[in-house]
Amino acid sequence: MTFRLVLFAILTAMTSAGYASGVYTWIDEHGVRQFSDTPPETRTYRAIPQENLAPSRYTPNLERPRQQQSATRPQSRQQSATPQRQAGSTANQRRAEQQRRQEQQCERYQARLRSIQAQLRSGYSNAQGNRLREERRQITERYNRECLRN
């Protein structure tokens, strides 16, 4: 019984070492550092030890830019909010409504990005992970373009 257990432990250790994938890094022809789990055939590369690898700690920075923006916008709104005519008042109301809709859209972007990040942290299939990362990239681009502009 113990012999079988020792034999099983040795065989498991030997076979799992072959399945442990390494991470390799090298500089490509454009001077860009590349990372892969398979070494390149035509370039010199460096293997990164497994103990130096850590999971990604990506967190989108959504709150800080929005707070900075909120701190500067009310001042500019107060300066330009002196209506001289009735038409100016209506234009201000339209601008305020448009601003409110824009803020709601930005909040929806933030909520969706948080949801995607939670799904990525909880585990996923390869295809689903690729889809989530692509959606995260697109929403981040929209958020940056629509919500962080001055």
Image (cartoon, rainbow, N blue to C red):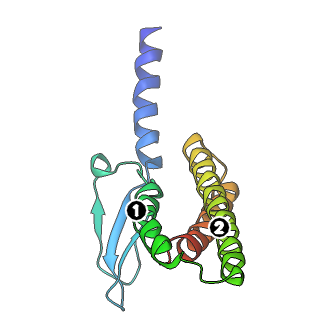
Say which of 138 and 89 sits in front.
89
Q: Residue visible at 69% across and 79% down? A: 91
Residue at the top extreme of this rendering = 1
Residue 145: x, y in percent? Answer: 56, 77
Residue 38: x, y in percent? Answer: 45, 66
Cα distance in 3D space between marks 1 and 2: 16 Å
Say which of 40 and 13 sits in front.
40
Say which of 92 and 5 sits in front.
92
- Location of mark 2 (residue): 102
The answer to whether the residues at label 1 and label 2 have Cβ atoms under 8 Å apart is no
Q: How many marks?
A: 2
The image quarter in which residue 141 lies? bottom right
Q: Is residue 91 above or below residue 67?
A: below
For disc 2, the neighbor class at 10 Å (few under 14, some 14 to 19, many from 20) is: some
Q: Residue visible at 67% across and 50% down? A: 125
Q: Amino acid at mark 1?
A: Ala
- Location of mark 1 (residue): 71
